[in-house]
Amino acid sequence: SEYKVDALYDPSSIHTARWLTFPDETTRRRFEQEQASSMAMDVDHNPVFLASNKYNLEVTMERWPKVGFHATREHGQRLAHG
């Protein structure tokens, strides 16, 4: 390898990630409950949606029009919720 570092690679079912913002805590709780198996937190404790494919992301965005799905965020940024 280029850096002479041993590495193991495992397959993943994650196609893409989106940072989330919510209009209120009720929406946040409902979304996180419904999408629990597709949720993660980043290093700054921002909620992240892990989409298994493009269709999964598009359908979820359509079902949750009030939720903000963000492809990027600034390093160290704590996203506002509610």
Image (cartoon, rainbow, N blue to C red):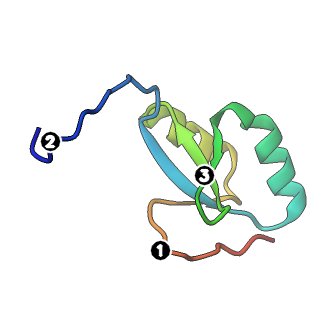
For disc 2, the marked residue is: 4
Quadrant that contains the C terminus:
bottom right
Q: Viewed as shown, does residue 44 lie left or right of 36?
A: left
For disc 3, the marked residue is: 48
Quarter holding residue 26: bottom right
For disc 1, the marked residue is: 75
**Numbered badge on residue 44:** none
Mark 1, mark 3: which one is toward the viewer?
A: 1
Tell me the distance, in whole angstroms, between the alpha carbons under discs 1 and 3.
Answer: 14 Å
Which residue of the protein is positioned furthest toward the left in this rendering?
Answer: 2
Which residue: 49% across, 31% down? 52
Q: Is residue 32 above or below residue 28?
A: above
Which residue: 22% across, 40% down? 5
Q: Earlier in the sequence, mark 1 or mark 3?
A: 3
Viewer-proximal residue among 7 and 21: 7
Q: Position of residue 65 (x, y in %)?
A: 67, 55
Task: Residue type at mark 3: give it.
Answer: Val
Q: Earlier in the sequence, mark 2 or mark 3?
A: 2
Viewer-proximal residue among 16 and 8: 8
Task: Residue type at mark 2: give it.
Answer: Lys
Q: Earlier in the sequence, mark 1 or mark 2?
A: 2
Q: Is residue 22 above or below residue 36?
A: below
Tell me the distance, in whole angstroms, between the alpha carbons under discs 2 and 3.
Answer: 32 Å
Q: Position of residue 58 (x, y in %)?
A: 51, 41
